[in-house]
Image (spheres, grey):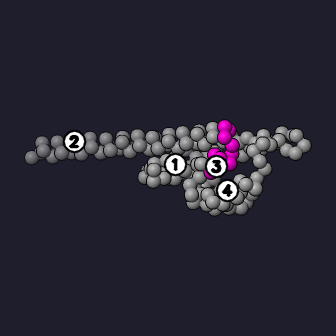
Amino acid sequence: MNRKIQLFTAICIILLASCADKEKNSHEIWKNEILETEQNFTAMAGDEGIRKAFLTYAAEDAVMMRNDKLIIGKENFHEYFGNQASEDNDQSLTWKPDFVDVADSGDLGYTYGHYTFSYTDSSGARIEKTGVFHTVWKRQADGTWRFVWD
């Protein structure tokens, strides 16, 4: 009887350890998915324009805070970006996450880091603004990550 208890205990320990490893591996996989999404997002902003990148990577119910105002919903992003200066004034936006984490459930994550926004103003001067960004990511039904807060 004692031997059966020892065997049962050993099996339980092995199973728990394997579950913990699987959870840790999943967590790292999810973090890497978010980092890859961030990389694709910033690449699209550089290659195809800021407007297209934000509209592509936003969830339908996403929220952005710009100039101390909330822009709620992807539908309103179209209006916001439509009111911005056109992409032909040599705008660029680059960023890189310094940190990423994801919920144990694998459906919500966040990143933060530094960004640089630069453009040429009407006098031809190059203006560069830097700051810190914080983005909240949500896994969509199709498995992709889209931002819900930026």
* Residue type at numbered disc 2: Ala
**Among numbered discs 4 and 2, the one appearing first in the sequence:** 2
Residue at numbered disc 4? 78
* Cα separation between marks 1 and 4: 20 Å
Look at the picture and state if 34 lies above or below 77: above
* Residue type at numbered disc 3: Phe
- Rendered location of residue 8, percent (x, y): 18, 45
Residue drawn at (43%, 52%) of the image: 105
Observer-nearest residue: 12 or 78? Answer: 78
Residue at numbered disc 3? 54
Residue drawn at (41%, 43%) of the image: 26
* Cα separation between marks 3 and 4: 10 Å
Observer-nearest residue: 150 or 11? Answer: 150
Residue at numbered disc 1? 145
Within 10 Å of disc 3 (Cα), the crowding (few <14, some 14-19, many 20+) is many
Badge nearest the viewer, 2 or 1: 1
Which of the 4 image quadrants contains residue 80? bottom right
| SS class, disc 1 | strand
* Cα separation between marks 4 and 2: 59 Å
**Of helix, strand and loop, which mostly describes the magenta segment?**
helix
In magenta segment, residue 47: yes
Q: How many marks?
A: 4
Image position of 116 (left or right of 122): left
Badge nearest the viewer, 2 or 3: 3
What's the magenta region? 46-55
- Rendered location of residue 29, percent (x, y): 45, 40
Observer-nearest residue: 141 or 114? Answer: 141
Which of the 4 image quadrants contains residue 48? top right
Within 10 Å of disc 1 (Cα), the crowding (few <14, some 14-19, many 20+) is many
Image position of 77 (left or right of 36): right
* Residue type at numbered disc 1: Trp
* Cα separation between marks 2 and 1: 39 Å
